[in-house]
Amino acid sequence: MTELEVRNTVHKYYWIDDINCATITLKTLSIAFSIEISSQVVDSAIGLHGAGKYGAQCGLVEGCLLFIGIYGKVLNLDNKDIVEICSFFAEGFEHKFSSLPCSQLRPGGFNDTDPEHLGEDRI
């Protein structure tokens, strides 16, 4: 996928389909890497946007971690290597954005007055 295709896909998922960051990340990566994701796995990400808006781990991180596990198995990596890659990704995300929890990444945490889909510009 080109950067423009990713941006258009993410925008559609956010504003037309109204799905969360974790699901968007998982689905977009599956398209980019031509990996089919079962509907059950996609459904499992429904509540992963900061643990159901609780403010826990960012959905962008959660979606990536899910995909890393799936793709790691496609590449026949062992669990230890997948865990190390997940850790490396989380560390890099935290370094770039200064945090992993949504409650710290979103201005003012989760408030009714926040604009929707703040993660769109980070994908």
Image: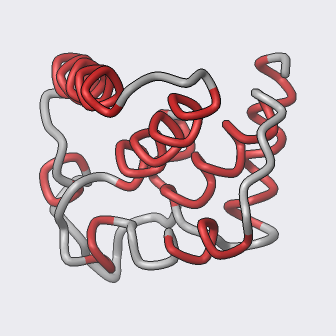
Residue 57, above or below 122: below
Image position of 102 (left or right of 117): left
Identify the residue at horizontal 31%, vertical 23% (top origin): 89
Identify the residue at horizontal 16%, vertical 61% (top origin): 108
Residue 94, above or below 69: above
Identify the residue at horizontal 20%, vertical 77% (top origin): 54
Query: In terms of image quadrants, where is residue 73?
Result: top right
Given residues 107 and 22, the one toward you in this image is: 22
Q: Which image quadrant: the C terminus?
A: top right
Identify the residue at horizontal 78%, vertical 29% (top origin): 32
Q: How is the image coloured?
A: secondary structure
Q: Position of residue 17 (x, y in %)?
A: 77, 72
Residue 79, above or below 67: above
Image position of 16 (left or right of 67): right
Q: Which image quadrant: the N terminus?
A: top right
Q: Position of residue 52 (x, y in %)?
A: 33, 79
Given residues 116 and 25, the one toward you in this image is: 25
Residue 4, above or below 118: above
Q: Position of residue 96 (x, y in %)?
A: 25, 18
- Count of marks overlaid on the render: 0
Q: Position of residue 74 (x, y in %)?
A: 64, 31
Given residues 81 and 40, the one toward you in this image is: 81
Image position of 102 (left or right of 119): left
